Image (cartoon, helix red, strand yellow):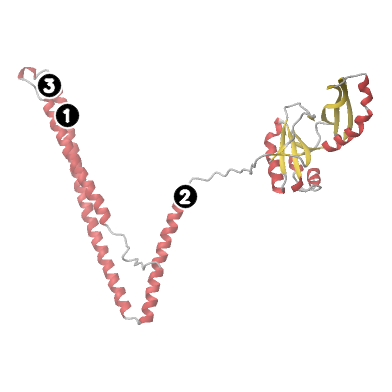
Amino acid sequence: MRPKVDPIENAPGQDSFSDVVTNLVAVLIIMVTVVGVRAKDALLDAAPASANSTAEQAPDVKAAQAAFAGVQADIHQLSKTISNQDIEIAYRREERDRIQLLVAAVKEALAERRGKLNDSQQSQFDAQRNLIAARSELGELERASAVLQDSEPPTAVIEHLPTPMAKTVFGKELHFRLKDGRLSYVPWDELVEQLKQEAPHKIWRLKEESEFTETLGPVQGFWMQYTLKRTEHTTPTKVGVSVQTRVELDRFVLVPVTEEAGEPLDAALGDGSEFQSILAQHRPAETTITVWVYPDSYGQFRTIKQALYGKGYLTASRPLPAGHPIGGSPNGTRSAAE
């Protein structure tokens, strides 16, 4: 419980002000003493060492006399300032005495008024007085709080996304291309599935060639250019060396039908876009979004990542040099999602 506070007793006094003024007067007196000593030293230094050197030292004597005159003027000014301070101190003391007499008279009047009340009225009187004191203290606290808020420097807010340990993607993976601020769906799985169906029908070409490149598609705005090659593997056996001929996928690249493919990023992140429609077909807990990003759109990738994070999707980025197509090979690496 807070102690009772008497606003009259807490009225500001003049003692601290008097102390400050008294200290100021003391400092002025010390300054006068120091100036006097320095003036004396200056006169002694300027005094002639002998009667023969009087003429030679005349300029120094004049300079010392001028300095002494300046010191005297400073002393008179300090004396005047001290006199003014004495007058101010006397006035403030008289003002303090009047305030103390007024406070004593008010306290006596309040005590007399309270003495005429019964117990119930006295309790109500005390409660009202405490309420006034509490409101006064609250006002002081609010003013102090306002001063602190005005002096507090603005807070810089830095947005960040949680970045957990990246993990290799093995589940469902959707691919998108971000270039020139446009986001387009890359039909990776669809083209790979078509490659699996078409490649067996093209193997005959490897009878005469060690490798060949074919194109299939387009599928949803992308062509696939793939290269198959013939390799030979030797295996030592008891009866000699066995030579096995294999057909392997060397590499493939995905080329857009047009560089204007996809949607502007703002439109893609809005409702009803193709991007939102594709996402709606896949559960966030089971799907990773891989974005192939070109240098002109690195800054916009963060916007996509933030939007996907809000929907619960893990995101993987695949930075590409300018002019380099999306592609893969059996020796490539899997995406790492965050």
What residue sits 76% from the left and 30% below the top?
Answer: 332
What residue sits 89% from the left and 33% below the top?
Answer: 196
The residue under label 2 is 150
Locate residue 288 relative to residue 54 in the image: left or right: right
Locate residue 148 relative to residue 247 in the image: left or right: left
Q: Is residue 97 above or below residue 154?
A: below
The residue under label 3 is which amino acid type?
A: Ala
Q: Is residue 251 above or below residue 190?
A: above
The residue under label 2 is which amino acid type?
A: Asp
What residue sits 46% from the left and 54% below the top?
Answer: 146
Direction front: furthest residue: 238
Closer to us: 66 or 38: 38
In the structure shown, which secondary structural element does the residue marked by tag 2 occupy? helix
Of badges 2 and 3, nearer the viewer stands 2
Closer to us: 230 or 274: 230
Of badges 2 and 1, nearer the viewer stands 2
Q: CA distance from mark 2 to mark 1?
A: 52 Å
The residue under label 3 is 58
* Residue 336 position by quadrant: top right
Q: Quadrant of the C terminus?
A: top right
